Amino acid sequence: MQTYAKKRLEIIVEAPIQERLTALLDRLAVTGYTVLPALAGRGRSGEWSREGLVGGAGRMIVIVCLLDAERVDEVLEAVFSMVSRRTGIVSICDVQVVRPEHF
């Protein structure tokens, strides 16, 4: 089966900025993204869990989108400018897709 190269952008960030971040992706004409809850993790500041949290404060989400390689710099710069002042991680990796018209 033929596959097509894309870039996967993954953003782990505080839930309260979800709407602003997805609005930014919309303005940048990112064709699609998925928002997932982040349940727990461990990082530089130690372990964390959303268990027992009330409201959005302290909760984390994951936003995943697939991009053409030539769009990565534009999208990454805009996303990083929003995320850099907050708790979060942004990563990029190479992926292969089987339906390129979706991205």
Image (tube, grey):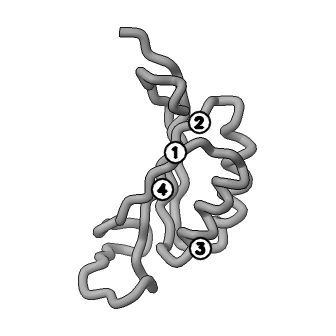
What's under tag 4, amino acid-wise? Ile
- Using the image, tell me which numbered label, if any, was put on residue 63: 4
> Which residue is depicted at the point 72% across and 62% down?
81
What's under tag 2, amino acid-wise? Leu
Q: Identify the residue under disc 3.
A: 86
Q: Identify the residue under disc 1.
A: 65
- Give percent across and percent down for residue 86: 59, 73
Badge nearest the viewer, 3 or 1: 1
Provide the secondary structure element on which disc 3 rests. loop
Looking at marks 2 and 3 on the same chain, the residue that comes earlier in the sequence is marked by: 2
What's under tag 1, amino acid-wise? Cys
> Which residue is depicted at the point 39% across and 88% down?
55
Looking at marks 3 and 1 on the same chain, the residue that comes earlier in the sequence is marked by: 1
Provide the secondary structure element on which disc 4 rests. strand
- Kindly indicate whether the residue at mark 1 contacts the one at mark 4 (C-beta within 8 angstroms): yes
Q: Identify the residue under disc 2.
A: 67
Provide the secondary structure element on which disc 2 rests. strand
User: Dividing the image into 4 quarters, which one contains the C terminus?
Assistant: top right
Provide the secondary structure element on which disc 1 rests. strand
> Which residue is depicted at the point 50% across and 49% down?
33
Label 3 crowd (10 A; few <14 / some 14-19 / many >=20) = few
Q: With respect to residue 26, does 83 lie above or below?
A: below
What's under tag 3, amino acid-wise? Arg
Looking at marks 4 and 3 on the same chain, the residue that comes earlier in the sequence is marked by: 4
- Kindly indicate whether the residue at mark 3 contacts the one at mark 4 (C-beta within 8 angstroms): no
> Which residue is depicted at the point 50% across and 67% down?
13
